[in-house]
Image: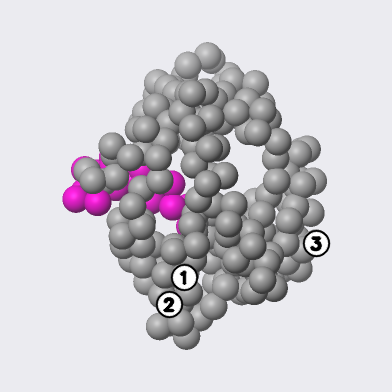
Amino acid sequence: MLGERIHAPQIASGDLLREAVRDNTPVGIQARSYMDKGSLVPDELVLKLIDARLDQPDAKSGFILDGFPRSVPQAEALAGMLKDRGERISKVVAINVPEDELVKRISGRRTCRNCNEMYHVVFDPPAKPGICNKCGGELYQREDDDEATVRHRLQVYNNATKPLLDYYGKAGLLSQVDGVGPSEEVLHRILAKIGDGAGAKAAS
């Protein structure tokens, strides 16, 4: 929704990693074991994917980074990557949601095996249980979306990603947004922080 509003592609590190795993690329093969356990994929693998994605034409006039960076070393590497391109991060948005709500949201996700369309058993269920509305494919729960793995991922977040709040806060780039409520409301909160129609580089 944010990408459509500010006319910028959403670059999600998780999507890039899952595509690499699905396509059985060298990066995907290495990343699979970390993702299945809910652990952070090593920086060198993630950075390779991000670097290649930023070189694509649709990212030249601005982009949204979703789920990246996830650690201070990644943020430092990103800054260098952008500096080499004559670019910079314009705003960092931290979307805050209570942990129990996050577990409910993520563990309820279901993904189509064919087209990767995503649903939620409570918030956005398919018309027919277990069947994708879009292509009729089978819906399944990703291994990294079960509750135990989600809670482990939250522990990893607290250890590795929370320090980014201080890192970007000291740089004067950080805005924090309440992520509870209808998606349209959360979108308006984000736009109020970054400016409706902003087209510069952004990370969340």
Cβ–Cβ under 8 Å for marks 2 and 1: yes
Q: Is residue 87 magenta?
A: no
Q: Which residue is mark 2?
A: 80
| Contact? badges 3 and 2 (CB < 8 Å) | no
Q: Is residue 120 visible?
A: no
Q: Is 149 above or below relative to 53?
A: above
Q: CA distance from mark 2 to mark 1?
A: 6 Å
Is 25 in the magenta?
yes
The residue identified by callout 1 is 76
The residue carrying mark 3 is 192
Vertical placement of residue 113 versus 87, above or below: above
Q: Quadrant of residue 154?
A: top right
Q: Is residue 161 visible?
A: yes
Q: Is residue 42 left or right of residue 29?
A: right
What kind of residue is marked 3?
Answer: Ala
Q: Amino acid at mark 1?
A: Glu
In x, y percent, where is residue 86? 47, 85
Q: Callout 2: 10 Å neighbours few (<14), some, many (20+)? A: some
